[in-house]
Image (cartoon, helix red, strand yellow):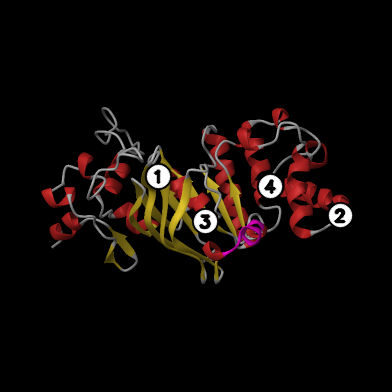
Amino acid sequence: MSPGKTLLRVENLSVRARLGGRIFYIVEQTSFSLRRGEVLGLVGESGSGKSVTCRALLRLLPGANLELAEGKVIFDGRDFTAMAEPEIRAERGASIGMIFQNPASHLDPVMSIGEQVAESIVLHRGVSRAEGWSQTVDLLRQVGIPDPARRARQYAHEFSGGMKQRAMIAAALACDPQLLIADEPTTALDVTVQAQILRLLLDLRDKRGLSIILVTHDLGVVAQSCDSIAVMYGGRIVERGPKRDVLKAPYHPYTARLIACQPAHGAGSGLLPSIPGQPPSAGDMPPGCRFHPRCDLARPSCREDVPALVRRAASHLAACPVTAEMEP
């Protein structure tokens, strides 16, 4: 499916935390856009701010100590950041659906799977419980759950990991949203089930015209599924652009290192390369470029100046002045 007009525009989004009298940023000055029918891969190591960014789009920040500090989320021409709580609550699920990490912890153990999916349909669409149940059974069928009428009456503990993930996808799609946020949808699943879930998401994109934000740390998943990539590190986007361009010719050292860490398709030899050091913690971010303590290209200026995302090719942006100077 060829992506269409812009559906989502995120402008300078920042999320800060208040903890023990301290204030620090979890996500800082994050900007990106998403077209209708586009699949965007949001990539980075654990703790880079991917999940918090996605939750901030719906103002579902995980913790009372987190707050949206600044920025705009323009969805289908409407500013979500300016909406009152009742308005944004009505949009959750109806306009944007979200598949959270670890479906086992987000499925209610004392409600049947069907009840959990139907609840959203009845709430947002105002249909009867009988009609909500009928639509739920049809949804479970669409996401590939066998014998959906029987399975709808079962509970989460009766589902396998892959079936739980399909149930979460059904719940996220219950109100036919325009955007689906999939937060690590293949984590803890075996390779075969991972491929099935990714294929399902792409099929749903083609059938429904969905836009998808796919949060992952796996560049192999991105290569199979996405149209574009945004790479996050230390709460900032350090590179973004079309998938093929970013994977073929990365401009940021962090992106290049991530790609180099992927297992070879052919007969590799020796140990996999790794990125030295550890990602920074949210409350102790280094000044300047946040990747500089782990970067072998770092200069003294990298320790002081915050690099801006600048255009390096047609639709390809990166935040590294060092590699920009190295280009012929």
Q: Position of residue 217 (x, y in %)?
A: 42, 42
Rounded to the nearest whole Å, what is the CA distance between mark 3 and mark 1?
A: 23 Å
The earlier-in-sequence mark between 3 and 2 is 3
How far separated are the C-alphas under marks 3 and 2?
30 Å
N-terminal label among 2 and 1: 2
Task: Give the mark toward the camera: 3 or 4.
Answer: 3
**Residue 223 located left or right of residue 310:** right
Element class at badge 3: helix
Identify the element where label 4 is drawn: helix
Q: Is 87 part of what is drawn in magenta? A: yes
Judge depth for marks 3 and 2 and give the one in front.
3
State how far apart marks 4 and 2 are (Cα): 17 Å
Callout 3 crowding tier (Cα within 10 Å): few <14, some 14–19, many ≥20:
many
Q: In the picture provided, is 160 more to the left or to the right than 155?
A: left
Tell me the residue that label 3 is attached to.
Answer: 57
Mark number, residue 219: 1
Q: Would you say residue 133 is visible in this rendering?
A: yes
Q: Is 96 on the left or on the right of 151, as rendered?
A: left
User: Please, what secondary structure does the residue beneath circle 1 have?
Assistant: helix
Question: Which is more N-terminal, label 4 or label 3?
Answer: 3
User: How far separated are the C-alphas under marks 2 and 1?
Assistant: 43 Å
Secondary-structure class at tag 2: loop
Amino acid found under the numbered disc labelled 3 = Leu
Query: How far across and how far down the image is residue 123, in percent?
Result: 76, 54
In this picture, residue 257 sits left or right of residue 59: left
Question: What x and y, as percent, mark residue 153?
Answer: 81, 36
Residue 37, visible in the rendered structure: no
Indicate which disc residue 7 carries.
Answer: none
- Indicate yes or no whether the magenta region holds residue 187: no
9 shown above or below 26: below
